[in-house]
């Protein structure tokens, strides 16, 4: 009788295929999903833009604000009469998010109707003097970025929720001064 030692080519190839599939699963879980990567990128982009806006306010001695509405955010500047888009700063223009991506603003113990750390009455005095079109509604930011470096405390949540994947989100948190902190990813596994 012949005594065979070793593995056949088929056995070796089968082991390599199994190892390859295991590595793909493990590496796929470590690197994250495209959804998670997009949420992380958007939260990092927002934090960088917010830091840029804060530095711009400090260097130019101008009061800035952040308006969050309808799945978008926009940086505004107070020109002495009203809140307008930040002049000469294309990077601080309005950013939009389409479903299933969303952003949600949470203000710690503060109402979200514009009555915050800085009294709106200060800005309303100037607006009464300004000549507005009858159709134009004045806008008020929910978050103030003051020229002294102070900011309104807030949490901006970048989330993803569709009917197929597990909902996940990142939180960008501001606590009176910069830098902002990014927390996440958080995955809601209850669904």
Image (cartoon, rainbow, N blue to C red):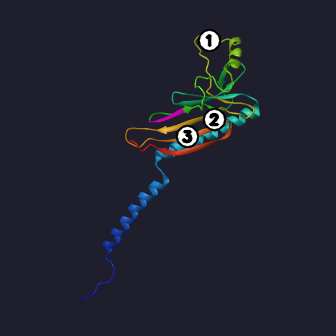
Query: What residue sits 38% from the left and 68% below the top?
Result: 16
Query: What residue sits 67% from the left and 39% below the top?
Result: 51
Q: Would you say the residues marked 2 and 3 are in contact, meaning their CB atoms lie under 8 Å apart?
A: no
- Name the residue beneath numbered marker 3: 171
**In the rendered image, is residue 96 in sight?**
no
**In the rendered image, is residue 29 in sight?**
yes
Q: Quadrant of residue 117?
A: top right
Q: Would you say the residues marked 1 and 3 are in contact, meaning their CB atoms lie under 8 Å apart?
A: no
Q: Quadrant of residue 11?
A: bottom left
Q: Give the class, few, some or many, for how many residues have Cα within 10 Å of label 3's Cα (few <14, many ≥20).
A: many
**Where residue 158 appears, x then y in whole percent?**
52, 38
Query: What residue sits 65% from the left and 28% below the top?
Result: 65
- Name the residue beneath numbered marker 2: 91
Magenta span:
100-104
- Name the residue beneath numbered marker 1: 133
**Closer to the camera in the image, 190 or 66:** 190
**Closer to the camera in the image, 87 or 105:** 105
Image vertical order of residue 27 relative to residue 74, above or below: below
Q: CA distance from mark 2 to mark 3?
A: 21 Å
Q: Give the class, few, some or many, for how many residues have Cα within 10 Å of label 1's Cα (few <14, many ≥20).
A: few
Q: CA distance from mark 1 to mark 3?
A: 38 Å
Disc nearer the start of the sequence (2/3): 2
Q: Is residue 103 magenta?
A: yes
Query: What residue sits 67% from the left and 32% below the top?
Result: 89
For this orientation, the residue located farthest to the front is 109
Mark 1 vs mark 3: in front: 3
Mark 2 vs mark 3: in front: 3
**Where residue 175 appears, x then y in whole percent?**
65, 37
Q: Give the class, few, some or many, for how many residues have Cα within 10 Å of label 2's Cα (few <14, many ≥20).
A: few
Dominant secondary structure (helix, strand or loop) of the stretch shown in magenta:
strand
Image vertical order of residue 70 relative to residue 132, above or below: below
For this orientation, the residue located farthest to the left is 1
């Amino acid at each position: 009788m012949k005594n065979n030692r070793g593995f056949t080519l088929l056995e070796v190839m089968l082991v390599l295929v199994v190892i390859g599939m295991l590595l793909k699963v493990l590496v796929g879980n470590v690197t994250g999903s495209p959804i998670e990567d997009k949420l992380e990128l958007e939260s990092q982009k927002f934090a960088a833009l917010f830091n840029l806006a804060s530095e711009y306010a400090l260097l130019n001695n101008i009061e800035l604000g952040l308006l969050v509405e309808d799945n978008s955010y926009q940086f505004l500047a107070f020109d002495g009469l009203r809140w307008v888009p930040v002049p000469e700063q294309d990077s601080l223009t309005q950013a939009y998010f389409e479903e299933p991506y969303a952003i949600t603003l949470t203000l710690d113990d503060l109402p979200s109707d514009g009555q915050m750390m800085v009294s709106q009455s200060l800005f309303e005095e100037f607006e009464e003097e300004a000549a507005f079109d009858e159709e134009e509604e004045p806008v008020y930011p929910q978050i103030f970025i003051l020229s002294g470096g102070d900011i309104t405390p807030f949490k901006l949540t970048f989330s993803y929720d569709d009917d197929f994947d597990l909902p996940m989100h990142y939180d960008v948190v501001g606590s009176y001064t910069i830098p902002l902190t990014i927390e996440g990813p958080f995955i809601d596994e209850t669904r």
